[in-house]
Amino acid sequence: MYRSSEEAGILDYCRENNITFFAYMILEQGALSGKYNTQNPLPAGSGRGETYNKILPQIEELNNAMGEIGTNKNASVAQIAIAWAIEKNTLPIIGVTKVSQVEYAIRAAEIKLSGEEIEKIESLAAKAGVDTRGSWEQSMI
């Protein structure tokens, strides 16, 4: 949801110069995984819960839209988020703890999103108005 690398032209520069851009926190600590929502928040008292539970109402429409796109592609919300990052010509860094999660990510890499689907995801992310920039990150624009 924090796309300053794209907005500042860094992704374009990397693409033009054949540089791999590593994208991190694609799933926003699980908030964009489809696993959590306002009815099923992240664990209370956890760092992830403290950070993301307050924004779940703002990103619910985005998660729902990615769920709809996923339904049409036999994929999950998380796989659609990963596929979006790949479509943006980035190499997403995805934390995994199980072999099944690696297989899941491989499937996400095979998903092709249409221009309309990408536009929908991006417009809903912008509409959510959430700034997930880490406290350690400097603004790029």
Image (cartoon, helix red, strand yellow):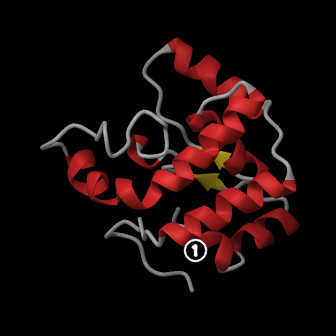
Q: Position of residue 83 (x, y in %)?
A: 71, 41
Q: In this view of the protein, which residue sits in the foreground, 93 or 133?
A: 133
Q: Position of residue 117 (x, y in %)?
A: 77, 52
Q: Position of residue 110 (x, y in %)?
A: 80, 30
* Residue at figure coordinates x 20%, y 53% from the top left: 50
Q: Secondary structure at mark 1?
A: helix
Q: In this view of the protein, which residue sits in the foreground, 136 or 81?
A: 81
Query: Dot 1: within a 10 Å radius of its alpha carbon, few (fewer than 14), some, or many (20 or more) residues?
Result: some
Quadrant where the image shows the C terminus: bottom right
Above or below, 114 against 95 in this view is below
Q: Is residue 88 visible?
A: no
The outermost residue toward the bottom is: 141
Taking 5 as reference, is 110 left or right?
right
Above or below, 121 against 41 in this view is below
* Residue 138 location, quadrant: bottom left
Above or below, 34 against 107 in this view is below
* Residue at figure coordinates x 65%, y 67% from the top left: 123
Q: Is residue 115 visible?
A: yes
Q: Position of residue 70 (x, y in %)?
A: 68, 34
Q: Amino acid at mark 1?
A: Ser
* Residue at figure coordinates x 67%, y 71% from the top left: 6
Name the residue that disc number 1 marks.
4
Taking 90 as reference, is 56 left or right?
left
* Residue at figure coordinates x 44%, y 49% from the top left: 28
